Image (cartoon, helix red, strand yellow):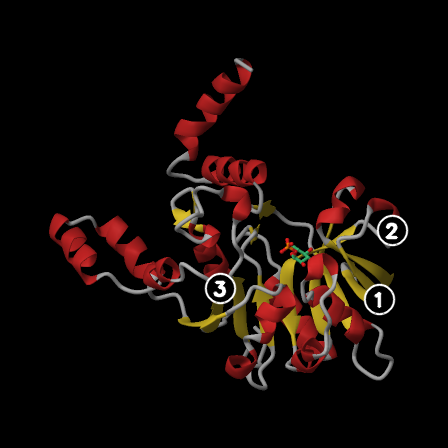
Amino acid sequence: MPTKRFKAVIPAAGLGTRFLPATKAMPKEMLPVVDKPAIQYVVEEAANAGIDDILVIIGRNKNAISNHFDSVPELEVKLREKGDDARLLRVLESSDLADIHFVRQGEPKGLGHAVLRARAHVGDSPFAVLLGDDLIDERDELLTTMMAEHERTGAAIIALMEVDPDHIHMYGAAAVEETGTDDVVRVTGLVEKPAKEDAPSNLAIIGRYVLGPEIFDVLEHTEPGKGGEIQLTDALQVLAADPEGPGVYGVVFRGRRYDTGDRVDYIKAIVQLASDRDDLGPELRPWFKEFAATL
Ligand code: G1P
């Protein structure tokens, strides 16, 4: 377990336009993935890595997110009266994961801008940024490796994953060099959502970062980039190109990642996670087979 006290920042201020009308009155981070809202998986991932101070950057409709992590005494009383201990435990767990704080993004000016809003709360701590569209299977390890790499190198650490070159335009893409350590690479360049022919590799940034507070000074001076937004990728490119600094390293993830950012991938994530679960899988798996045979 890393020794430094890390905080976590979860940007959750996106408009969720791909899921309208479901996200008209509810943030996309609250969409259920099986029986938990997507953001709870991300909060659990941070808590499992030993982080107990989490800042969520919120947009409009913030109440659903803050209410979710708060306790609901009347619901707890009802479940206790009914003797429904299993559900009671799940409800209690969701309000006892970490110390969760909220700050508003104000105008949505991009991921880099959202992260900059964390400056006052994060202070001088190293911190992890976790994006809710990417869910990392809790059985596969990523964040603690990244935190340990940050402690070892003092560098900014990003999570990378090999993707189909036809999909690289949906991600930040990294140019890298080997380091001699398996699945740890030095990042020599970064470009946000390049066209396939301009991509430096098929290594995509998946939504996990472990950063030091120096990123804030860079973000202060980062001009709007791709899509007219202040991009975290552009700020990291400045660190990667700085010969004086510790640079940027990538941890290449080869485990299970679920993308909940678009509708088809969101449905796939639910199907995969539900079919793996002990309580739901045994009933679902034969049905999936039968259903698939009708297609
Ligand atoms: C953001 C980042 C991008 C990264 C992606 C991972 O993009 O800007 O570099 O690859 O998250 O999910 P978004 O998907 O928010 O547009």
Badge 1 is on which residue?
A: 179
Q: Which mark is residue 48?
A: 3
Of badges 1 and 2, the one in the foreground is 2
Work out whether 164 lies above or below 211.
above
Q: Nearer the viewer, residue 155 or 216?
A: 216
Asked whether disc 1 touches disc 3, contact meaning CB atoms under 8 Å apart, the reply is no
Given the image, on which type of amino acid does mark 1 rest?
A: Thr
Sooner in the amino-acid sequence: mark 1 or mark 2: 1
Q: Residue drawn 40% across and 51% down? A: 26
Picture quadrant of residue 74: bottom left
Q: Residue drawn 40% across and 49% down? A: 36
Sooner in the amino-acid sequence: mark 1 or mark 3: 3
- Report, in whole angstroms, how far the alpha carbon at label 1 lies from the one at label 3: 28 Å
Q: Give coordinates of residue 249: x percent, y percent.
A: 76, 68
Of badges 3 and 2, the one in the foreground is 2
Given the image, on which type of amino acid does mark 2 rest?
A: Asp
Work out whether 167 lies above or below 151.
above
Given the image, on which type of amino acid does mark 3 rest?
A: Asn
Q: Residue drawn 41% across and 30% down? A: 282
- Report, in whole angstroms, how far the alpha carbon at label 1 lies from the one at label 2: 24 Å
In the displayed structure, does residue 180 sit left or right of residue 256?
right
Q: Residue drawn 85% across and 74% down? A: 241
How packed is label 3: few (under 14 Cα within 10 Å), some, or many (20 or more)?
Answer: some
In the displayed structure, does residue 154 sit left or right of residue 271?
right
Q: Give coordinates of residue 4: x percent, y percent.
A: 58, 81
Picture quadrant of residue 64: bottom left
Q: Nearer the viewer, residue 25 or 152?
A: 25
Q: Secondary structure at mark 1?
A: loop
How packed is label 2: few (under 14 Cα within 10 Å), some, or many (20 or more)?
Answer: few
